Amino acid sequence: MSTTPWRATGLLFENCSCQLLCPAHVSFKQACTHERCQGHWTIRIDEGHYGDIDLADTAGVIVYDTPQLMYEGGWTQACYIDERATVPQREALDDILSGRAGGPWAVLGHFVETRLETRFVPMRLEDDGREKRLTIPDVLDTTISAIRGADGAAEARLENLYNVIHGPTHILARGRSRCTDRVFDFDNERTHALYSRFIWEAGQGTPTR
């Protein structure tokens, strides 16, 4: 486990194969909609550092396949990092997203049984307000769109829900994802999605959320 102090803030969005709302997003002890939960977490870091390494304007994706009850473990997981990152940034992001640097991904790492080799790939990440998109050629294509709330204007939101990787306000969305790479092969359509603004940190004497 790395002891390097680090901090990162940015955007996190996800889509999985569950119907709205994914039960495991509320608690890993709740069974997902199907026998397998397949999806991704997409991360854009707007500001951050890993020791002396600047992490601003970097991005990564975790793609996963888990049992219906995620709390049982046995996850298969792969990390993809935007190839535009420098070598020091790549190493720092790999430490963070693998959980080796502590923080929220170390918590999720306890459930991972098979962690595939990290890959550095071309990414196109677009943030168009209520719609978020990511394309990794020959790997993943995903789009999520926010759901409007009862007033017909503002987005539907979840507040004050405990989640180690998301920020305190979760914007509900619908998403679609097509993934064909290595052991992953799934096609989600109009399924669970959401996004939030996160603050992560570890090794600095302050809590991580």
Image: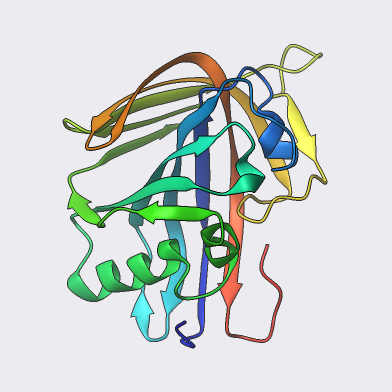
**Residue 124 x, y percent position in the rendering:** 26, 38
Judge whether 77 appears above or below 178 on screen. below
Quadrant of the rendered image containing residue 176: top left
> Residue placed at 17% from the left, 44% from the top?
122
Q: Position of residue 88 (x, y in %)?
A: 24, 76
Location of residue 93 (image quadrant): bottom left
Residue located 80% across and 14% down the image: 151
Q: 102 or 148: nearer the eye?
A: 102
Q: Is residue 54 left or right of residue 16?
A: left
Residue 50 screen position, x and y as percent: 42, 78
Report the front residue among 49 and 103. 103
Q: Does residue 169 lie above or below 167 as drawn?
A: above
Given residues 93 and 36, the one toward you in this image is 36
Residue toward you, 36 or 166:
36
Image vertical order of residue 64 relative to residue 95, above or below? above
Q: Which residue is drawn at 62% across and 17% down?
A: 19
